[in-house]
Every structure is written in C-alpha cells, then in structure tokens.
Amino acid sequence: MKIGIDIGGSHIGIGLIDDKGIIIDKEERYIINSSEKSTQLEIKQENLKQELEEFIINKINQYKQTIKIENVGIAVPGTVNKTTIIRAVNLDLENYNIAQILEEKTNVRVHLRNDAKCSALAELKYGNLKGYENGMFLCIGTGIGGAIVYNGKVLEAKNVPGYEFSHMIIQKNGIQCNCGKRGCFEAYSSIKRFKEKIAKEFCLDNLNNNYIKEFIINNLNDVRLRYIISQYIENLAIGISNLINIFEPEIIVFGGGFVDYSDILLEPLKQQILTTNLLFNKRDDIILKLAKLGNDAGIIGASLNDKTPIFNE
Ligand SMILES: [Zn+2]
C-alpha cells in the first residue's frame, strides 16, 4: 500500500492507495485563515506547518499500525525538489524541508512532486490522458498548475519541475501575481480570480463554489455577469492557445475548481480557442476533457513513485 497526500491551495487530502491506484481510505482538511469560522477539522493558515505536520504524521502512524506502507508521496502546489518545498506562493511557503521532517517522525520514505505533474501522472496511468502520446493537463483552481505529456511521458525539468504555465505573462504591466511578477496567466485566469471578480461586482461574501455557481446560473441574463464571464474566457483562451501553439497537444484535460463550472465555461472556451484566430496551426477541433479522477488525481498521482514505469527519468 502507498500513501498519497495532496496539499492544495485551500485544502489537504491524504489517502491510502492500493496497487491498482484505488483509494481505500481518505481524509481531508480545509486550510482556513483566522477570520474564517473554524471547527476541529480545519488547518489554520497562520499555523500551517505545525498543523500540517501533525495531521500527516498522525495519519501515517495510524495507517502503519495495521498496514505495510511502501512509500509516501506528496503533491505540492509549487516548486519542489524531491525533499523540499522550494516555493509555494499561494501557501506562502519557502524552503520547507517537509520530507525530512516527516521521515524522521514516521520512518517511512517520503517524496515530493509538483501537484499538476502528479495529477497528470494519475490521469495518464488511470484517467483521461491514458492512451495519448501527446497531451496537456491544466489544474485551474486557486492558481493554475500545468503538465505536458510528450511521447507518453510527463515532462519535468532536471532540478525544479518547470512547465510553469501559470506564470507566463499574458499582459504587459498587468495585475500583480502572488509570484511577484505582473500580468501572469493565473492572475487573470485562475478560478479564484474568476470568483473574486464576480463576488466583488455583485457584493457577494461567499466564495464557495456551489454558491457562486448557483448565483451564475440564476443570473445568466445579467449583462455585467456575462461580461465578466466573457472576459475570463478570453484570457483563459489566450493562455491556452499559447500552450497549444507550443506543444500541439491532442487532448487537454482540466482539473481543479474549474471542473465545477465546466458546463458554463468549457464549450465557450473551446469556441473561443477555435474561432478567434488564436491558433497558429488551424484546427477543426480540440479534445477538451475533465479529469476522470476529479479531485483525487493529486492524491493518486502523489502515490506513484520513481519505480512507476511511466515515470520520466
Ligand atoms: Zn506569477
């Protein structure tokens, strides 16, 4: 058995995974700041490292009592090497040697990988990227994570993960991004940004996906709302078309909070990409699909270790 851990921008999930990639058991916590209402089941942003370590160590030690654990993998929304979170801008973490800390407390091998690369590995092995030689995975949520499948392998750079699509600049002197640069793709096109724009325009104080989605469905005739949606799709299409022009994927698979809005956003996005003169090589169609494994892709992908045959050496 393996343990997969997915540290997201707003939540953490830990799961026990069998050899077929099936989650046998799973537990989740939301990451909140001190102004939000708390129950016992949340992790506070202000105390992130300590509460994160406690949650993970307790869970590993609990599983270890009855099951032999081969390895623990962690999916991280940011730049990592095998043992250290070098920088995760949306969690405000830097040079955090989490693998060593966890290994010392649990005596189990722990390895890290960028979350979008984990999800792409899982979708390639068990999900909607399976069977494609050339594809792309985009996790659009708090930020935007990305991965490229080329010749059936998930590409990673040597010392850091690379393929940071979210921080390509799509607007000169544009909006400030959490990474410190201006005009980044994710500063315009993350689902967080999409929700914040709607909440600000209509004075909503709830950013819950179900709430915002219901608001959209009930107000689709509102001109201001339609403008926000069309602007969002335009920006998303610019970023994605840049990537299509570079990598020419056969398929793009989407994960993250974007999935919750896909029946509103996916078809207009496809039309925007195909019909507005964004593509260098014209296409009649592009396959856009949602992650088959949904929010579990990160946990399952994190559990795939270096010995997994599809791992890109
Ligand atoms: Zn950025």
Image: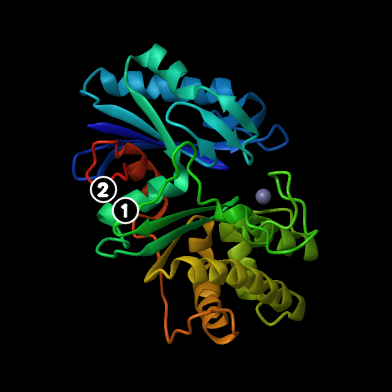
Picture coordinates of residue 272, whole percent (x, y):
57, 80
The answer to whether 199 appears left or right of 149 in the picture is right
Q: Amino acid at mark 1?
A: Lys
Crowding near the residue tagged with mark 2, few <14, some 14–19, many ≥20 C-alpha atoms within 10 Å: some
Q: Residue at x 52, y 83 (%)?
A: 274
Q: Amino acid at mark 2?
A: Ile
Q: What secondary structure is found at the residue carrying circle 2?
A: loop
Residue 10 sits above or below residue 153 on the image: above
Image quadrant assignment for residue 197: bottom right
Distance from disc 2 to disc 1, alpha carbons, whole Å, reads: 6 Å
Q: Residue at x 38, y 24 (%)?
A: 59
Q: Quickly name the residue at label 1.
A: 153
Label 2 vs 1, first from the N-terminus: 1
Check if mark 2's residue and mark 1's residue have beta carbons within 8 Å. Answer: yes
- Residue 203 seen by the camera: no
Q: Residue at x 61, y 29 (%)?
A: 94
Disc number placed over residue 310 in the picture, else none: 2
Judge: label 2 CB < 8 Å from ligand 1: no
Q: Residue at x 48, y 58 (%)?
A: 138
- Residue 154 seen by the camera: yes
